[in-house]
Image: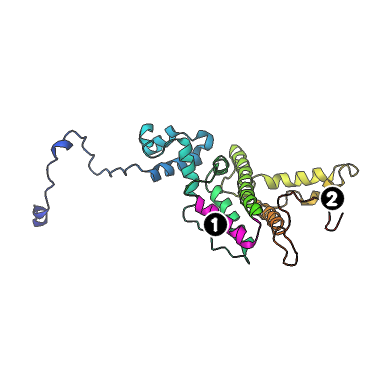
Amino acid sequence: MTDAAADAPVPPPPSPWERERPARTPGAPARAPLSRERVVEAAFTVLDREGLDGLSMRQVAAVLGVTVSALYAHVSSKDDLLELMYARLFDGFEMPAPDPERWQEQVRDYARSGRLRLLAHRDMARIAMAHVPFTAELLPHLEALLAVFRTAGLPDRIAVEAGDLISTYIEGFVLEEGMWQDRADQLGGDRSSLARPDWREMAGEMQNYFASLPARDFPHLRAVAGLMATDSSDERFDVGLEIILRGLASYLPDPGAATAPDVGRAPDVGRAPGDS
């Protein structure tokens, strides 16, 4: 025995209340204590592997190597777990201070980052659409988005609707992308792509089909046949977002106008300014 070994501290004998515990396997790492964070991480593991329809408390418990009942010390129900998963997507995200000169750019950044957050995990758009984002964790983000709209000068009624409209657009767009990704999975495609997996293969067929329609019955579809299915998902998302932003900008007060528009009444669609 070396001097160093002789000087090493001798571990104390187990205390009386530890004698009945099973001995730990030599060299085995201690299991991390169960926590809400670990439960949420395990739920993401199941979600990415099985999808929302396959996500269950039993599956989450299996990933963690615990009983289902152990989960309920940290989450109250599956719905509670889903809300925590959605809130987790916003960890580290912070809206910049509202700038009325850059409000459209700020909304673009918010929408693009929101889409990427939902795309980071399978079926997150479905989870987002099923849960109202008014939890304590998400209220600061809702407040910050409203601040961007109201500081830009949008009327309060429009600012409120704009927040819901942007969220619905992001979630609906990603939901469609997820449906195409699931289809790609069934066909052995690549889930890592953000574009529609088989869209390029279908694009030519769609363009040729619309171009072959009878001109008398479908003049407009024939006219835009060459534009059908030409954009990537990124481009389509940006174009749709631009349409929304330009529509919102039309509600900004006109500095030269004597009164603000009546935002409580639906605009007259198709009527040119000045028409009686």
Inspect the magenta stretch and tell me whether residue 145 lies in it. Answer: yes
Q: Quadrant of the C terminus?
A: bottom right
Instruction: Check disc 2 and give the amino acid type.
Output: Ala
- x 50%, y 54%: residue: 140
Q: Which mark is residue 25?
A: none
Q: Which mark is residue 223?
A: 2
Task: Return the residue nearer the eye: 13 or 161.
Answer: 161
Please give left or right for residue 140 compared with residue 269 in the image.
left
Please give left or right for residue 71 compared with residue 189 in the image.
left
First in residue order: circle 2 vs circle 1 = 1
Task: Return the residue nearer the eye: 116 or 270.
Answer: 270
Magenta stretch, main secondary structure class: helix
- x 72%, y 59%: residue: 260
Q: SS for tag 1?
A: helix
**Above-or-below relation of 242 to 206:** below
**Above-or-below relation of 151 to 44:** below
Crowding around mark 2 (Cα neighbors within 10 Å: few <14, some 14 to 19, many 20+) is: few
Inspect the magenta stretch and tell me whether residue 47 lies in it. Answer: no
Q: SS for tag 2?
A: helix
Q: Which residues are magenta?
A: 138-155
**Above-or-below relation of 31 to 226:** above
- Residue 268: give x, y in percent of width and height: 79, 50
Please give left or right for residue 56 compared with residue 11 in the image.
right
Mark 2 vs mark 1: give the one in front. 1
- Residue 122: give x, y in percent of width and height: 54, 43
Distance from the alpha carbon under mark 2 to that under mark 1: 43 Å
- Residue 145: give x, y in percent of width and height: 57, 56
Asked whether disc 2 touches disc 1, contact meaning CB atoms under 8 Å apart, the reply is no
Instruction: Check disc 1 and give the amino acid type.
Output: Ala
Residue at far front of view: 258
Task: Return the residue nearer the eye: 272 or 61.
Answer: 272
Give the residue number, with chain letter if any, for mark 1: 144
